Image (spheres, helix red, strand yellow):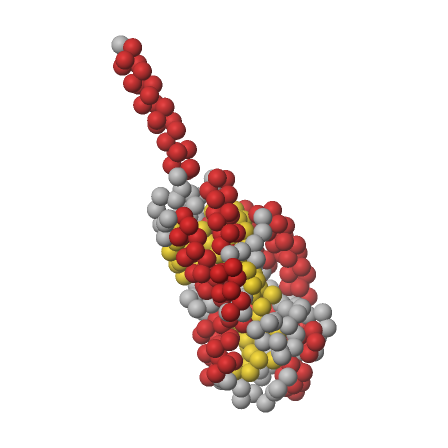
C-alpha cells in the first residue's frame, strides 16, 4: 500500500474509533423523553414539566414528558428500566418505586436498585389528608372517631397499590386503630374528584393537586402529613399535632436513568437538573404550587432510598400488607 493510502486508512480508522466517544460528548443530539409513571396533572407531572422546559432550553433539545401511569408506578418505571442506556429516556420516579413496590409486588418486572442509575432528587411533596365536605367531621380526631364507630364503612383512595398514598393511609389506620377499605384510582386528579363527588371518603394527596379543590370548597382538609405545617396552608395542623404523635408522611420525586447509562451523560443531566431545581424562577413556581424543590448527589439519593426502604419494610410488616 502506498504511504498516502496507508495514512488515509489510518485516519479513517481513527475517526471510526473515536466516533462513539465524540457522539457521547455531544449529548444530546435529539429530544429526550422524561417518563412520569403517573397521570398528567399530578405533582410529579407538574415538577417534570417545569424542569423539562428549563433544562431543555439549556441543552438546546426538547425534553418530552411522557405520562405512563399504572400499577402504582410500576408501568412507567419498567419503561425506563428497559430503555436503551443512552440518556434519551429517563424517569421522574416517586420514592414508592424503590421503597414500597418491592415489598408488596411479588413479581416486580425490574429491580429498583439494580436497573436504574440515580441522578438527583428533584422535589418533595407536602401532602394533605382530604375528605368529602359532606362527611360529618371537622378535624382528624373527628374522622378517627367516625371510623371507629363503624369499622370498615369508610373508604380511602390511592393512585394504586404500593403507592406512597396507599402506605401512608395504612400507617394512619394502624396508628389510629381504625379500619377502612382501599379504593385505588389511576391518578391523583381522579381520586380528588371522587372525593369531591362523594364516591370515596378520604385521600392523601399532594398539596399542589388539592389546592384548587380546597379553594373551591369542594373538599375539606384535615391535616398535613409532614413534620411541619406547610406555608401554603399554614392553619392546617400536622397529623402529629392533631391526633397521632410521631406520624409523618412525605412523598418525593427523583431523576433516574437506565442502568449502564454513560457517566458523562449522567453527570451532564445531574448538573443541568440540579441547576434547574435551584433556579429562583423554579423555586417560585414550585412554592406557588405548594411543592419544594430538592437536589442531591447520586450517592445521597441512593443512601436515602435504602434507609427509607428499610423503614418501609418495618412498616409493611407492622400493618400486615402482603405481596400480590
Q: Which residue occupies 46% across, 42% down?
A: 265
Image quadrant where one finds the N terminus: top left
Can see residue 166? no
Relative height, residue 149 to residue 266 (above, below): below
Q: Which residue occupies 43% across, 55% down?
A: 54
Q: Which residue occupies 39% across, 58% down?
A: 66
Relative height, residue 199 to residue 50 (above, below): below
Residue at the front extreme of this rendering: 280
* Residue 120 image offset from top left, x and y in percent: 54, 51
Task: Give the side of residue 317 with respect to residue 9, left or right.
Answer: right
Can see residue 305? yes
* Residue 296 image offset from top left, x and y in percent: 58, 51
Task: Give the side of residue 322 with respect to residue 212, left or right.
Answer: right
Task: Give the side of residue 89 with respect to residue 308, left or right.
Answer: left
* Residue 82 image offset from top left, x and y in percent: 43, 49
Relative height, residue 261 to residue 281 (above, below): above
Q: Which residue occupies 49% across, 54% down?
A: 276
* Residue 247 image offset from top left, x and y in percent: 68, 70
Residue at the right extreme of this rendering: 245
Residue toward you, 287 or 107: 287
Image quadrant where one finds the C terminus: bottom right
Callout count: 0
Residue 148, by quadrant, is bottom right
Amino acid at each position: 500500500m502506498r504511504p498516502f493510502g496507508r495514512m488515509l486508512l489510518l485516519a479513517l480508522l481513527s475517526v471510526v474509533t473515536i466516533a462513539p466517544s465524540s457522539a457521547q460528548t455531544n449529548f444530546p443530539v435529539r429530544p429526550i423523553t422524561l417518563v412520569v409513571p403517573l397521570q398528567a396533572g399530578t405533582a410529579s407531572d407538574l415538577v417534570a414539566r417545569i424542569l423539562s422546559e428549563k433544562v431543555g432550553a439549556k441543552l438546546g433539545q426538547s425534553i418530552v414528558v411522557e405520562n405512563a401511569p399504572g400499577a402504582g408506578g410500576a408501568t412507567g418505571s419498567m419503561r425506563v428500566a428497559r430503555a436503551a442506556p443512552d440518556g434519551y429516556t429517563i424517569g421522574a420516579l416517586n420514592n414508592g418505586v424503590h421503597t414500597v413496590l418491592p415489598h408488596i409486588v411479588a413479581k416486580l418486572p425490574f429491580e429498583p436498585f439494580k436497573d436504574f442509575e440515580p441522578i438527583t432528587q428533584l422535589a418533595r411533596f407536602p401532602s394533605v389528608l382530604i375528605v368529602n365536605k359532606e362527611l360529618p367531621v371537622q378535624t382528624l380526631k373527628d374522622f378517627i372517631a367516625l371510623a371507629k364507630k363503624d369499622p370498615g364503612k369508610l373508604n380511602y383512595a390511592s393512585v394504586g397499590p404500593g403507592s406512597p398514598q396507599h402506605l401512608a393511609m395504612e400507617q394512619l389506620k394502624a396508628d389510629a386503630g381504625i379500619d377502612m377499605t382501599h379504593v385505588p384510582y389511576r391518578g391523583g386528579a381522579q381520586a380528588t374528584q371522587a372525593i369531591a363527588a362523594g364516591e370515596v371518603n378520604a385521600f392523601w394527596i399532594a398539596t399542589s393537586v388539592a389546592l384548587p379543590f380546597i379553594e373551591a370548597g369542594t373538599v375539606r382538609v384535615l391535616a398535613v402529613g409532614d413534620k411541619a405545617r406547610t406555608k401554603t396552608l399554614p392553619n392546617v395542623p400536622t397529623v402529629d399535632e392533631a391526633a397521632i404523635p410521631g406520624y409523618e408522611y412525605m412523598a418525593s420525586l427523583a431523576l433516574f436513568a437506565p442502568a449502564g447509562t454513560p457517566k458523562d451523560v449522567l453527570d451532564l443531566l445531574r448538573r443541568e437538573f440540579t441547576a434547574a431545581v435551584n433556579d429562583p424562577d423554579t423555586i417560585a413556581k414550585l412554592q406557588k404550587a405548594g411543592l419544594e424543590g430538592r437536589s442531591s448527589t447520586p450517592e445521597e439519593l441512593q443512601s436515602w432510598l435504602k434507609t427509607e426502604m428499610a423503614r418501609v419494610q418495618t412498616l409493611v410488616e407492622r400493618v400486615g400488607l402482603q405481596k400480590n
